[in-house]
Image (cartoon, rainbow, N blue to C red):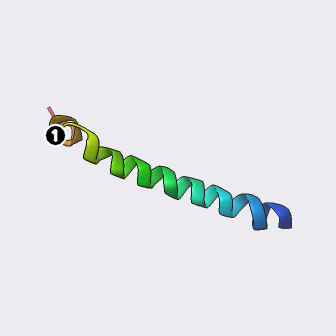
Amino acid sequence: MSFFRSRVLPALIVLLFSLALLAVSARIWLPGDMAAPAPLS
């Protein structure tokens, strides 16, 4: 359990953070109509 807490968990958090950062920064390269929120109707 200590191996999981000291090695796997921080790596998972960093991976998740970088994935979220990539998803947010990818919006810059999208065309304007794709980066807009989806219409409700």
Q: Give the image location of residue 33, x and y in percent.
A: 16, 36
For numbered disc 1, what is the local secondary structure? helix
On screen, residue 29 versus residue 9, left or right, reads left
Please say whether residue 1 is visible from this viewpoint.
no
Near-viewer residue (38 or 33)? 33
Q: Assign the C terminus to one quadrant of the image.
A: top left
**Residue at the image point whose x is 67% and y is 64% from the top:** 10
On screen, residue 14 versus residue 29, left or right, reads right
Q: Is residue 16 above or below residue 2?
A: above
Q: How many numbered discs? A: 1
Near-viewer residue (16 or 37)? 16
In which quarter of the view is residue 26 placed?
A: top left
Residue assigned mark 1: 32
Near mark 1 (Cα within 10 A), the count class, few <14, some 14-19 or many ≥20, is few
Q: Assign the N terminus to one quadrant of the image.
A: bottom right
Q: Give the image location of residue 37, x and y in percent.
A: 21, 42
Q: For the view shown, which residue lies furthest in the top direction?
A: 41
In which quarter of the view is residue 35 placed?
A: top left
Please say whether residue 27 is visible from this viewpoint.
yes
Q: Is residue 3 above or below residue 23?
A: below
**Residue at the image point whose x is 79% and y is 60% from the top:** 4
In which quarter of the view is residue 38 placed?
A: top left
**Residue at the image point whose x is 27% and y is 42% from the top:** 29
Q: Is residue 5 above or below residue 18?
A: below
Name the amino acid type tagged 1: Gly
Q: Give the image location of residue 17, x and y in percent.
A: 51, 58
Near-viewer residue (15 or 1)? 15
